[in-house]
Image (tube, coloured by chain):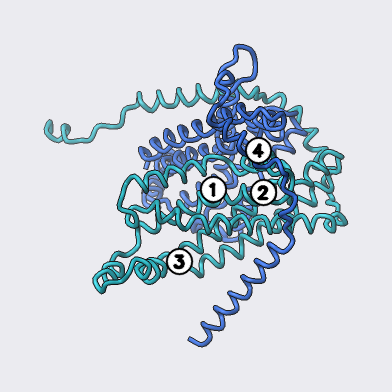
Amino acid sequence: MNAQTKQLPKPPGKLKHALTFVIVLFLLWGSAVQTEASFGRLISGIPNMWDLLKEMFPPNWAYFDNIVNPMLDTIRMAIAGTTIGAIFAIPLSILAANNMVRSPWVYQIARFILNLLRTIPDLLLAAIFVAIFGLGLIPGILALAVFSVGLIAKLTYESLETIDRGPLEAMTSVGASKLQWIAFGVVPQILPHFISYVLYTFEINVRAAAVLGLVGAGGIGLYYEKTLGFLEYDKTNSIILLTLAVVLAIDYFSTKLREKLL
Amino acid sequence: MNRNRWLHWLIAIALVLIYVWTFWDIRFSGIKETAGKITRSIIQGIFSPDWDYVYLPDGEDLLRGLLDTLAIAALGTFISAVLCIPFAFWAAASRNKSMALSGAGKFVLSFIRTFPEIVMALLFIKAVGPGSFAGALALGLHSIGMLGKLFSEEVENMDAGPTEALIATGASRLQVLWFAVIPQVLPGFLSYTLYRFEINVRSATILGIIGAGGIGTPLIFALTTRHWDRVGIILLGIIVTVTLIDLISGYFRRKLA
């Protein structure tokens, strides 16, 4: 009897859980104080919100004529940014994979660069590029490209590290050159994954490109400030609806394509 | 084989057309002549940042801006983690529920996900006025989309055994929830909440661009007034904060898994 009770596992400590709970509560309370959150303001704001929603409906259907072109610009920006990002991601992902590059120095530095690229949100990058290049599509494309490099290269190098070594060893044993080794051993294994990641990044970039205009980087985002500034909320609603429709459609097709690839 | 080759050609032609359409209209001539100079100034600013801005005894400085950003992210994540639970159970497919019901829940969640957080913040600014609170509310509402989806998948993957065992012994619905459902889904819920917190810290840094609080406001101000050394220190601050939060949150997520 005694021996049996000794074998029973101890229940997890209650104190640790309680302490974690208290710390989280304390942090949340601090956050609420810092952001000056108050239920009173939220509740007194609800009528404002309701008025806003009432003015947003029905959407201004005629306004669609004005925003179709900016929407196409947005898609162009996403395509161009993703493509440039994908091209630069190829060498970086090879440098970051530890089965492609022997030296830990090289792949650790490459990974550090990739992590650094992904810490800065694309809207901030766009704001900086707008300061450099001026208003237009170019800063938007560059911002998306920088962000895409980080994301595509990270996903690709992680797949590269899990590829099958068999074909590679077979190629080495028959005396293939380094270029042949990559073209016939690595590329066929990684290509479907790579294309899938590019499509995934494209989905993210379409969403991002839709708001880049807020900092002056072109596309449909520019029109949010225009319509909100003139209190034309029915037009704002048209922009939101068009963006939602385009994003959902692109997501749908891209997901279907990705399912076919893998 | 022949059909495959046709398909490849078709894809290639479609791609070429898409790229021609993409790059045909883009004007590369609009670039400012000062671009090179400004780039140099920004890089110089990043390597010789305005250290004095880190802490100013009175008013707006880097540390307070970053603290504000973290507070927005934390509050937003908490709001969404609470609000998304009913959505998660709604969208989760299970045996005693119609496909249409869970399908509707999934659609609502993907709709919320698609709505850009920055636009949501614009609308909340109209409702509660500019400031961090509007930002936190926007993040809270937007994050429901992703957290609800991840939570509902966690509920779907739950083992039915414990629930059935408890029902068989005559437990009440509340007891089933407390002893069978919550212990199974809690680690997953917490892990996803932390993951979303990481994303929200990044999002909170941009909310300031439209006046919804956080470090974005001084950054945009420094950019428009051309204080490049200040831009440098703010960028450094963002990079360090995001990296630290990722490391800490990643450590806790590994412990939960």
Instruction: Give the residue at mark 2.
Output: A140
Callout 1: chain: B
Q: Within 10 angstroms of label 4, few (less than 14), some, or many (20 or more) residues?
A: few
Tell which circle, 2 or 3, labels the residue nearer the N-terminal end. Answer: 2
Q: Of circles 2 and 3, which is in front?
A: 2
Does residue B1 lie above or below B87 as drawn? below
CA distance separating discs 2 and 3: 27 Å
The residue depicted at 43 percent of the width and 53 percent of the height is B157
CA distance separating discs 4 and 3: 40 Å
Q: Colour of chain B?
A: blue
Compared across the picture, whether A21 is left or right of A225 comes to: left
CA distance separating discs 4 and 2: 20 Å
Q: Quadrant of residue A79?
A: bottom right
Q: Quadrant of residue A31?
A: top right
Residues at discs 2 and 1 both on one chain: no
Q: Amino acid at mark 3?
A: Leu
In the image, farthest residue toward the top: B57
Q: Amino acid at mark 2?
A: Gly
Q: Is residue B134 visible?
A: no
Q: Within 10 angstroms of label 3, few (less than 14), some, or many (20 or more) residues?
A: few
Instruction: Give the residue at mark 3.
Output: A191
The residue depicted at 47 percent of the width and 58 percent of the height is A90
SS under mark 3: helix
Instruction: Give the residue at mark 4.
Output: B37
The chain drawn in cyan is: A
Residue A169, horizontal then vertical, whole percent? 26, 67
